[in-house]
Image (spheres, grey):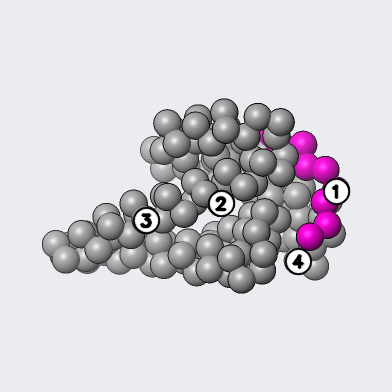
């Protein structure tokens, strides 16, 4: 599972790097920083405040996941589980906006992303043909 996640991370990072270059963002290599790469997605399909909120939620998810792995605690587990569910909903809403900007049938991509619990999201980001869009 770890190898699969790493390969998907590579695909997503290359896709976001391509997006950042086409959109002429100031720091395109932010696509390779875990957590901060989601700022590029948020900035592309939402306003700046929502992009920051999405990034903060992603970082909180990473911290909670690492904490849960390091510390075996029932309260921490339930906190993590609730936050993961909330984050998944937020992530799918953001990705739906992303798909609306890059695909002709965004609902189809959103449905496949939901069905696979986000596993196809990096592939869809990588394969998207980003047009020059200014926000």
Q: CA distance from mark 4 to mark 3?
A: 29 Å
Circle nearer the N terminus (4, 3): 4
Q: CA distance from mark 1 to mark 3?
A: 31 Å
Circle nearer the N terminus (4, 1): 4
Quarter containing the C terminus: bottom right
Is label 3 in a helix, a strand or a loop?
helix
> Predominant secondary structure in magenta?
loop
Q: Mark 2: few, some, or many residues within 10 Å (few <14, many ≥20)?
A: many
Q: Nearer the viewer, residue 101 or 70?
A: 101
Q: CA distance from mark 4 to mark 1?
A: 17 Å
Residue placed under numbered mark 3 in the picture: 86
Residue 27 numbered mark, or none: 4
Left or right of 79, for residue 110: right
Q: CA distance from mark 2 to mark 1?
A: 19 Å
Q: Which residues are magenta?
A: 127-135
Q: Which residue is painted at 57% across and 46% down in the image? A: 95
Q: Which residue is painted at 64% across and 40% down in the image? A: 99
Is label 4 in a helix, a strand or a loop?
loop
Q: Is residue 108 visible?
A: yes
């Amino acid at each position: 599972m770890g190898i699969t996640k790493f390969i998907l991370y590579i695909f997503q990072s290359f896709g976001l790097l391509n997006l950042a270059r086409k959109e002429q963002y100031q720091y395109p290599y932010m696509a390779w920083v875990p957590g901060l790469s989601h700022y590029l997605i948020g900035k592309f399909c939402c306003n700046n405040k929502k992009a920051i909120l999405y990034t903060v939620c992603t970082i909180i998810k990473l911290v909670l996941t690492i904490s849960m792995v390091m510390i075996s605690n029932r309260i921490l587990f339930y906190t993590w589980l609730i936050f993961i569910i909330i984050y998944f909903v937020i992530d799918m809403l953001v990705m739906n906006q992303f798909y609306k900007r890059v695909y002709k049938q965004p609902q189809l991509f959103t449905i496949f992303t939901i069905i696979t619990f986000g596993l196809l999201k990096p592939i869809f980001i990588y394969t998207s043909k980003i047009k020059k869009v200014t926000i």
